Image (cartoon, grey):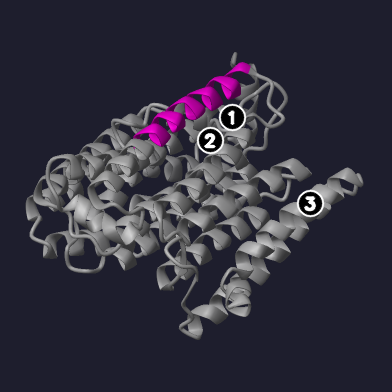
Amino acid sequence: MGTDFFYALLPEQGVLGLILLLMVLEMLRRDPRVARLAFAAVMLAGLGVLMQQLMGGFSAEPVPGEVQVDRLALLGKAVLMACSLALALGFTHASGFKFWILLASALLGGMVVLDSAGFATLFIGIELLSLPAFALMVQGQGHTPASEGAFKYLLMSSVGTALLLFGISLAYGSTGSLAIADFARVLSGSGPAQAAGLLVLCGLFVKAAVFPFHGWAPDAYAGARLPVTAVLASLVKAAVVLALLRITASVVLEATVTSLVAALGIVSIVFGNVAALGQKRLKRMLAYSSVAHAGYMIFALVDSTGSRIEDLLWYVAFYAFGTLLACAAFARLSPAREGHPDDELAALDGQFARRPLAALLLALAVLSLAGMPPFPGFFAKLFVFKSVIASGHLVAAIAAFVGSFLGLAVYLNIVLRLFRSDADPATAATRLRAEPH
C-alpha cells in the first residue's frame, strides 16, 4: 500500500519537494537563476515518471473515494507539466525564486484536481491553483493596472468558488455522497439535483472565463507581466478545463443542460473573437481570445459519443502550447522598455526582417490558434466539431464554425504585421517611444 501510494503520487511529491527546495535556496540567498534550472529539471523528471506510468497502464486509488490515478489523470498531468517545462524554457528572463515557487504551487493544485475522486479533494486543488495565480499577478508589481486586474481576478474567483461550493452542497444533499462518480446522477436529474449540477458548472465557467463570466480576464491578463499572462492563459486555463473534464468525463448531459452549454459555447466563441478584433495590445487580445477558446472547450462537453476525453485533452494541449509559444516569441520581438508596456502589437511591424526565427515562431503559433490547416489547432477544432456533429448537434456546430471565422482576422493581423515590407522596425520603435502611455 505504501509503495503504491508513493509511486502513484511520485510526480506530485517531486513538485512539492521542488517548492521546499526553492524556499530553502531563497533563504540561503542563492543565485536566482538556479530556480529556473531546478524547476525545469523536476518537470523533466516528472514527465519521465508519467510516461513510464502511461506505458505500463498504471492505475491506482491511493486514498479510496478521494484520490485516484487513472489514464485521464496521467495524461492531464503530463499536459500541465509539459506546459510548465515550456514556460521554463521559453521565458529564460523570468528569474526570481518567488515566481517559480508560485508557479510550482499552481501546478501542484492542477495536479491535485486531476487526481480527485471526490469533490473535497477537487475543491482543495482548485483553490491551490487559484491563489498562487493571484499572487503571481501582483508579485513584483506595484502599479495600479496590475493591482486592479488581480483584484478583479480574486473577486470573480471568489464568486466562482461560492457557486462551486453551493453546487457541491446541493449535490451532496441529492446523492448523499461527495464522490465525483455520483455527479452523473445530478447532471441527468431534475429540480434541485439539476440546479446543483448547473451551479458546479457555472463555478468552473467563471474560472475558465466563459462568457458571460469573463469580466475579470481582460484586466487580469493586461495588468500582469507577459510571463504571468502566459501562465494564466495556459497552465491555469488548462487546469480549470481539465477539472470540468474530470467531473463530466463519463456523463451524458441532460437535454436542457446540453442546450445551455452549447449556447454559452457559441456566444463565447463569437463574443471573444469580435472583442479581440479591435485590440492593439497582445495581452488584452489574448484575454478575449481565451474567452473564444473557452467556448470551443466547453462546446466539447455536449459530445455524447464517448470522445470527450480525447477531444478536450488534444484541444487543451494544442491551445496551451500555442499560447505559450506566442507569448515567448513575442517577448523576444518586443522586450519590455522602461515606462512602456511590453505588449504593443505595433512593435511587431516588419519584425521578420530583423528577427526571422522569433517572427516565424510567432506566426506559426497564432496560425495554430486560429485553426488554420495544417497546423495543430485546426485538428483540435476538427475533433471537437466532428464529435459534436456525431452527437446530433449539427446546427450548433455550424453556428460555432461560422463564429470561428471571426477569429481569423485577429490572428492574420499579427502575421501581416510581422511580414510587412513597408515597415521599418527602427521607425516603429521610435514611434512607440514617442506615444504617451
What amino acid is at disc 2?
Ala
| Nearest the eye: 349 or 291 | 291
Name which residue lies at 26% across and 64% down: 250
Name which residue lies at 28% across and 49% down: 298
* Residue found at the far bottom of this picture: 56
Query: Left or right: 374 with respect to 366?
Result: left
Kindly tell me whether residue 372 is visible in this rendering: no
Whichever of callouts 2 and 1 sits on the residue coming sooner in the sequence is: 2
Q: Is residue 137 magenta?
A: no
Q: Would you call the spot at circle 1 few (<14 residues within 10 Å), some (14-19), or many (20 or more)?
A: some
Name which residue lies at 49% across and 81% down: 58
Q: Quadrant of residue 194?
A: top left
| Residue position for label 2 | 423
Whichever of callouts 1 and 3 sits on the residue coming sooner in the sequence is: 3
* Residue found at the far top of this picture: 436
Check whether the beta carbons of the residues at disc 2 and disc 1 lie within 8 A of each other.
yes
**Residue 107: numbered disc:** none
| Residue position for label 1 | 428
Residue 54: x percent and y percent? 49, 79
- As helix, strand or loop, the secondary structure at mark 1 comes to helix
